[in-house]
Amino acid sequence: MAGNWNSVVDDSRNDIVFEGRNQKYGAYDLRRRYNWTVTIILASMVGTLLLGMGVKAILGLRGEEVEKQPVLDMTTIDLTPPPADKNEPPPPPPPPPPPVMETVKFVPPVIKDDAVETDPPPPQEKLTETNVSTVTQEGDGDAVVVPSEGPTGNGVVEEKAPEIFTVVEEMPEFPGGPMEMMKYIQKNIQYPQMAKEAGLSGKCFLKFVVNGNGNISDVQVLKGVPGCQECDKEAIRVVKSMPNWKPGKQNGRSVPVFFNLPINFQLK
């Protein structure tokens, strides 16, 4: 019996204490169930702690914000030119070459001791009626003499700027076609960091000219991304960096053509 009494965890100690007493008293039952109650409490505390840690870990994974990556949605680009209006008259043919002006050759003579006159100067009457040049050629009859300006008598003829078409028989095209252009834009464009942090997105509508030699010029923003000028500047930069296009053609000759291109800045 002494051995049982010295064992702290032995339930028989309760029987020794309450021997001959009212064991229906509540203290006996509490002391008898003490070890079991402590075990249940410790197990509950450990389980609650583990459950809390697990819930925190799950919520932490779900609540962790994943960095948004820029995506360029190019599926809305329609590069097909509008159909030609049957009622619209065909574009004018290329202008004819300018008429040839009649000239007479006159080179100031050079005095030499042994010089032989092989090309005598034209008579004065011919110089009065015809323009002076370094060669003699027949005119078409439709050429107009440009009035001379200044003390030197040299007239300046301004060249007329070429017409820029909107729709032509063969529209200009990026090397490899529209799909290659989409790949080029997606590879080279850089989503502005300021726009990413502010969550700005939208479409930038550009208009530019594909010249007769295929290079791009006069890039303009028709409608920019709302509140993001950096997006518009980036779209202009990428378009200007493009390689030469296949130029547009009208009546078999390369001509400058306007081209519209939307670029979509979108965060996913």
Image (cartoon, rainbow, N blue to C red):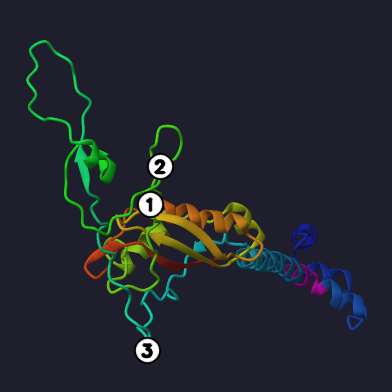
The disc at residue 131 is none
Inter-mark Cα distance, 3 to 2:
45 Å
Label 3 sits on a secondary structure element that is loop
Residue type, mark 1 in image? Glu
Relative to 151, is 250 on the left or the right? left
Of labels 1 and 2, earlier in sequence is 2
Crowd rating for badge 1 (residues with CA inside 10 Å; few <14, some 14–19, many 20+): few
Question: Which residue in the structure is indicated by mark 2?
Answer: 148
Question: Which residue in the structure is indicated by mark 3?
Answer: 87
| Camera-nearest label, 1 or 3 | 1
For image coordinates 40% across by 42% down, the residue present is 148
Of labels 3 and 2, earlier in sequence is 3
Label 2 sits on a secondary structure element that is loop
Q: Main secondary structure of the magenta part?
A: helix
For image coordinates 88% across by 80% down, the residue present is 23
Residue 98 in the image: state x and y as whole percent. Answer: 27, 57
Asked if marks 1 and 3 touch (Cβ < 8 Å), the reply is: no
Label 1 sits on a secondary structure element that is loop
Q: Is residue 34 magenta?
A: yes
The disc at residue 159 is 1
Residue type, mark 3 in image? Asn
Q: Which residues are magenta?
A: 32-39
- Count numbered badges in the picture: 3
Residue 75 in the image: state x and y as whole percent. Answer: 42, 74
- Figure quadrant of residue 43: bottom right
Of labels 1 and 3, earlier in sequence is 3
In the image, residue 252 above or below residue 110 = below
